């Protein structure tokens, strides 16, 4: 048993990985690594199976069997800077510990998220997410200017209220969700994999996915073996329901696919593109 350090992870400690226009992800600290998962797992397997499974195979086995508790022995602390509307989604992942900048103690900085022109997209019809086809550039530019104008106006109002002696906790209430916030965030690897599965998915908001991609790279640096298993077993998987399994069996047996309409669309999206619609 030993304290785990990972050479590559030591190199990225404290480094700010830029996300969006003004945000970042910074790895403050980590506890454990692939080695810790193995140490923890071997406690439950005892001497009998000690040499039966090689380390990588053991981690892969744990992931496949959803024997998740050894992954909980690895813990990450991040310093994150993101717009408030992303932080609102972030905090829904409850199995974490966080400490955020206080708008009561501090004067909020004039830092707002301004989406890139290419990311100012229309709403997808009858769907949760953005449409893939971009807006006309002139229209997107116009909207971007409107965002900036309103952000400037609301910050000037905030500054003015502070100068007039209003309490910071009340002066801030009209600041928009595009304002950047910062927090420390700690989560274990099991919950972090769950978080990544949900937030790397195409249904997650684009800005959220950008943060999740950066977190994935950091996690991969600390735990390359466990992350490879996660990418293959959790990230690369889709879940088939009973009707779909039945359809798969029939198709593999050379029979026609019994699914039609939306059920067929969902089935094909999974089979062809690995997408859960
Ligand atoms: C695409 C997308 C859209 C979403 N839309 C919305 C939305 O419109 N509105 C909204 O409110 N949320 C929304 N969410 C948030 C979502 O409902 C979950 O709250 C969020 O993804 C956190 O997932 P989680 O519960 O697995 O994570 P965590 O909160 O980190 O929990 C991890 C696991 O711990 C266990 N756990 C957590 N808390 C408890 C508890 N109290 N008791 C017992 N076990 C617990 C559960 O097994 C859980 O799966 C959305 C999420 C996604 C990915």
Image (cartoon, grey):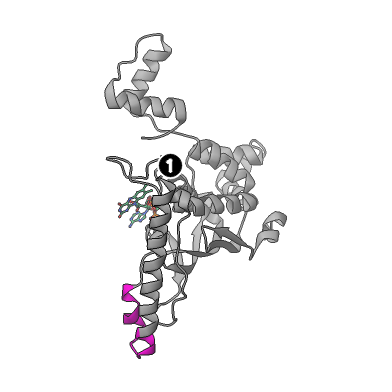
Q: In the image, is 7 to the left or to the right of 85?
A: right
The x and y percentages for residue 52 are 64, 35
Q: In the image, is 201 to the left or to the right of 2?
A: left
Q: Nearer the viewer, residue 20 or 189?
A: 20
Q: Is residue 23 above or below residue 154?
A: above
Q: Nearer the viewer, residue 245 or 72?
A: 245
The x and y percentages for residue 251 are 39, 14
- Image quarter (top left, top right, bottom left or bottom right) of the C terminus: top left
Q: Please state the extent of the stretch shown in magenta in the rendering.
A: 161-174
* Residue 43, magenta (yes or no): no
The quarter of the picture where residue 11 lies is bottom right
Q: Nearer the viewer, residue 183 or 83?
A: 83
Q: Residue lying at the far top in this picture: please name it.
A: 254
Which residue is denoted by mark 1 in the rendering? 202
Residue 29 seen anywhere in this rendered image of the structure: yes
* Residue 163, magenta (yes or no): yes
């Amino acid at each position: 048993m030993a304290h785990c350090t990972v050479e590559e992870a030591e190199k990225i400690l404290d480094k700010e990985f830029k996300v969006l226009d003004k945000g970042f992800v910074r790895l403050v600290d980590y506890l454990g690594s692939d080695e810790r998962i193995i140490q923890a797992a071997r406690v439950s397997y005892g001497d009998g199976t000690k040499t039966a499974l090689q380390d990588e195979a053991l981690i892969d086995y744990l992931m496949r069997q959803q024997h998740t508790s050894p992954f909980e022995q690895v813990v990450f602390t991040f310093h994150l800077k993101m717009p408030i509307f992303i932080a609102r989604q972030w905090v829904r992942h409850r199995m974490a510990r966080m400490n955020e900048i206080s708008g009561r103690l501090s004067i909020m900085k004039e830092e707002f998220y301004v989406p890139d022109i290419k990311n100012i997209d229309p709403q997808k019809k009858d769907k949760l997410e953005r449409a893939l086809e971009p807006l006309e550039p002139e229209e997107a530019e116009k909207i971007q200017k409107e965002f900036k104008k309103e952000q400037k106006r609301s910050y000037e109002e905030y500054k003015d209220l502070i100068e007039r002696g209003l309490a910071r906790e009340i002066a801030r209430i009209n600041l928009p969700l595009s304002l950047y916030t910062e927090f420390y965030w700690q989560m274990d690897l099991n919950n972090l994999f769950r978080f990544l599965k949900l937030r790397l998915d195409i249904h997650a908001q684009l800005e959220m996915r950008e943060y999740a991609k950066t977190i994935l790279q950091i996690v991969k640096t600390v735990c390359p073996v466990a992350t490879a298993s996660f990418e293959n077993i959790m990230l690369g998987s889709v879940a088939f329901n009973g009707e779909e399994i039945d359809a798969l069996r029939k198709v593999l047996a050379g029979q026609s696919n019994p699914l039609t309409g939306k059920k067929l669309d969902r089935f094909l999206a999974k089979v062809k593109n690995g997408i859960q619609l």
